[in-house]
Image (tube, rainbow, N blue to C red):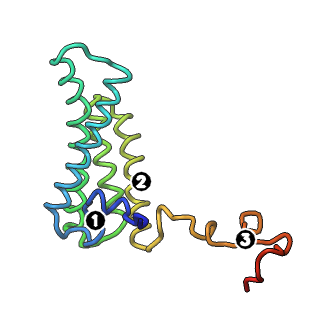
Amino acid sequence: MGVDTKRFKDYFPHYDFYATPDGQECLPKTYYYTKYGAITGAIFSIYEMALISKPQTLHSTLARFGRFTFPFAGMGFVFGSSICLLAHMRKKDDVINHLIGGALAGSVWGIKFGKVSTGHKFGLAIGFLAAYTKYFKLNNIPIFTSRTDATTTYDSKRDFTIRLYEDPGRPNEA
């Protein structure tokens, strides 16, 4: 029996947003940002309905589902389209496009609640998160690293092959 060596990417195919520079493949990028935003909003809505609001009728359930799903999808659309538009306007593929795109996407949340301060907070948070992610991708810095150094180093406490005494019943294995 072999060991399953598939990774998360093999089970769930995803779109690589950083395979091409900003300003190229605008429609697929915007589509996938909108799609992933809608999926995130749907998951958020389901948890919110199950744990907090607990709607009783089908109408109220659909209304609560749309309350978060559509703004999250809108945030994805605004993020993807604004990154593409900024890259075409500025003629650059850099961190600033993602910072401004994230700020515009976060402002959708402020428009939803009708509060400018909420939009600013979400805009700054999403903008800085997008900018840091773009910075890490541009400079080939891994965001999530595996701890292979901790598992491959020698540790005598975890080495169970050490013989404490010579077994007289076996020949020496060298």
Residue closest to the eye, 91 or 122: 122
Could you tell me which residue is drawn at 31 percent across and 35 percent down?
110
| Relative height, residue 48 to residue 12 (above, below) | above
* Left or right position of 165 against 134: right
Q: Label 1 is placed on what type of residue?
A: Asp
Horizontal side of residue 32 vs 110, given as left or right:
left
Q: Position of residue 150 (x, y in %)?
A: 63, 66
| Disc number for residue 129 | 2
Please name the residue that numbered disc 1 is placed on.
Answer: 16
* Residue occupying the far top of the picture: 56
Q: Is residue 87 above or below residue 109?
A: below
At which x and y percent is residue 141?
Answer: 47, 70
Q: Secondary structure at mark 2?
A: helix
Residue extending furthest bottom?
Answer: 174
Q: Residues at badges 2 and 3 in contact (C-beta under 8 Å)?
A: no
Q: Position of residue 136 (x, y in %)?
A: 44, 67
What whole-number distance in Å separates the C-alpha atoms at marks 2 and 1? 17 Å
For the point 22% across and 28% down, the residue is 65
Is tag 2's residue or tag 1's residue first in the polypeptide sequence? 1
Q: Quadrant of residue 165?
A: bottom right
* Picture residue at 37% right of the left edge, 34% below the top: 118
The picture places residue 87, in percent across and down from the top left corner, at 24, 67
Q: Quadrant of the N terminus?
A: bottom left
Residue 100 found in image quarter:
bottom left
Q: Is residue 135 visible?
A: no
166, 31: nearer the viewer? 166
